[in-house]
Structure formats: structure tokens, C-alpha cells
Image (cartoon, helix red, strand yellow):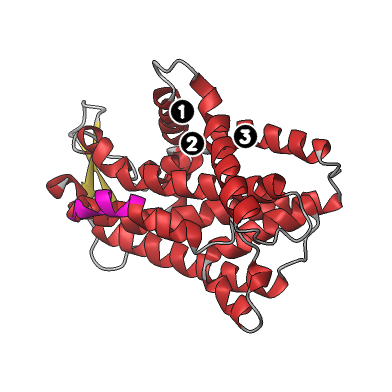
Amino acid sequence: METKELKCPIGNERTVTVICPQSGWVPIDFKELWSYRELLYTFVQRDIKVRYKQTALGAAWAIIQPFFMMVVFTIFFGKLAKISSEGIPYPLFSYAALLPWMLFAEGITRSTNSMVVNSRIMTKVYFPRMIMPLSGVISPLADFAVAFVILIGMMLYFGYVPTLNMLWLPLFLILALLTSLGVGLWLSALNVQYRDFHHTVPFLIQLWLFASPVVYPSTLLPEPYSTIYGLNPMAGVIEGFRWALLGTNPPSSMIVMSIVIVLALLISGAFYFKRMEKTFADVV
């Protein structure tokens, strides 16, 4: 948005700020986003509180969801289908992948719905609209932190001691968040225009889950298919998590491919979001 200041006649100290929409492909105003960081913090804090408001188990849901998914995957894919886990106990193998996956999936869900959920606020006051999907991506970090403690406990139980590779974990965590943000920017903008995406996202996440190496290792794919598999950005993130935590084979080529795709999603999503931003208040 472009702002203009209009000063009132002498004797009146008030200044009127006129906000004008820009046309075309609008660049991201990072300075403006930073100036509204407290609002971002408020949105994130509210999302976390609302998620567990009036629930009997509270934050325990952050552990229950990935834990029971791990149990189901272990029974059906580990025991019955006997899918390879690269020598790692299957519960640990699947749980280490479920954490970044659920961070990604929950971020997409919250960011996609953020514009519609906050429609009343959006039509009453101006602030950078990108804060809403951004808060939807950040707030699941609280669940991730709680569930990560269980992962450390599982690693110690199965005899896996964290190594220096764990220092790379923040990089893969950031990559998961950026992937979620890139997809979330596209879907949140589209969801304002077409409410079909509210119903499409759960189906998309289910398909994406089995297209990612959560229940199986990417090594099942021979070269060059494993490198091409990196076109799925979450493939590099998940395999990176396993490497940093459990010492599996480093997915170097896959990580490079995933980073390129994430940057493409993020940049294109941000510019599309900014292009459609001026119409949000009219159609939401």
C-alpha cells in the first residue's frame, strides 16, 4: 500500500494519512511488516490460546496427534507392510518425520483460513494483510516444541544420542516454515476469492502426506528419481530432519532441489498475495 500524509491547516496538529492501493506486481514492504511485529505477536498468541481453549487435554493434543499417527503407521506400514526404515526402529523413524510434516500441514491449514477467519478485523482497520497467513504459519511452532520433547525422549530410549548434525536442524525447520508460508500465501489469497479451497486443503494435505517420505524412506527411489523427488520440497525437509537427528544418509541433491522449489513458491506466493491484497476487503 502507498501512504500519503495530508496536514491540516495551522492550529490543528492532527495529520491525516491516506492509504492508496498500488497497481501491478507490488514488492514486499519488509519495513512495514517489521513495524507491525507486535500485531503479528498478538495474532500468534491468540491462535495458540484459541486452539486449546475449553479443551480437557489442552496442550497434550500436540503429543496425542503425532503419537497415535506413529502407532498406526508402525502397525500397518512397519509391521504388516514391512516397509524399510533404514535400520532405525520404525516408531522413531516415522515420528521424526511426522513432526516437520505436522508443522507444515498445520501451518497450511491455519494460514489458508486466516483471511476468512479475520475478515471482520480486515474490513475495519488497515495493517499488512500478510501478517495473517504469517501468524498461521508461526503459531504451530508451539505444538512442535511440545512434541519435540517426546522425540528426544524416544531417541534416548532407542539409544540414539544427538550428534553435531543436530546443529543443522534449525535450517530444516526454517525450510519447513518457508514451504508452509509459500503454499499458504497462494491458498489464503485464493481462498478469499474461491471458498472451494477451504474444502480442497484437507484433501491436498492427505495426498501430499503419502507423496512425502513420512512412512517410507526416499532411498526406495533409485537415481535419478530420488533427485527429481526433491521437487516435493517436504521431501528434502523430512529427510533432512532424519539425517540431523538419526544419522541417515545426507540427502544433499534433494535438499538443493527442495530449496529451489521453496524459494520459487515463496517469491511467487508473496507477489500473488500482494497483487490480490487490494481486493480482499471487498470480497471476503
* Residue type pointed to by label 3: Ala
As drawn, the label of residue 139 is 2
Extreme residue toward the left, this view = 282
Give the secondary structure at mark 3: helix
Q: Main secondary structure of the magenta part?
A: helix
- 3 vs 1, front mark: 3
State the image coordinates of residue 14 (x, y, percent, origin top left): 25, 29
Mark 3: few/some/many CA within 10 Å (<14, 14-19, 20+): many
* Residue type pointed to by label 2: Ser
State the image coordinates of residue 94 (x, y, percent, origin top left): 64, 49
Q: Is residue 278 above or below residue 262?
A: above
As drawn, the label of residue 283 is none
- Report the front residue among 222 and 107: 222
- Report the front residue among 245 and 47: 245
Q: Is residue 29 left or right of residue 5?
A: right
Q: Which residue is mark 1?
A: 48
- Report the front residue among 168 and 208: 208
Q: Are marks 1 and 2 in contact (CB under 8 Å)?
A: yes
Q: Quadrant of residue 176?
A: bottom right
Give the secondary structure at mark 2: loop
Q: Which residue is mark 3?
A: 147
Extreme residue toward the bottom, this view = 224
Give the secondary structure at mark 1: helix
Q: Quadrant of residue 247?
A: bottom right
* Residue drawn where x is 62% and y is 47% of the image: 74
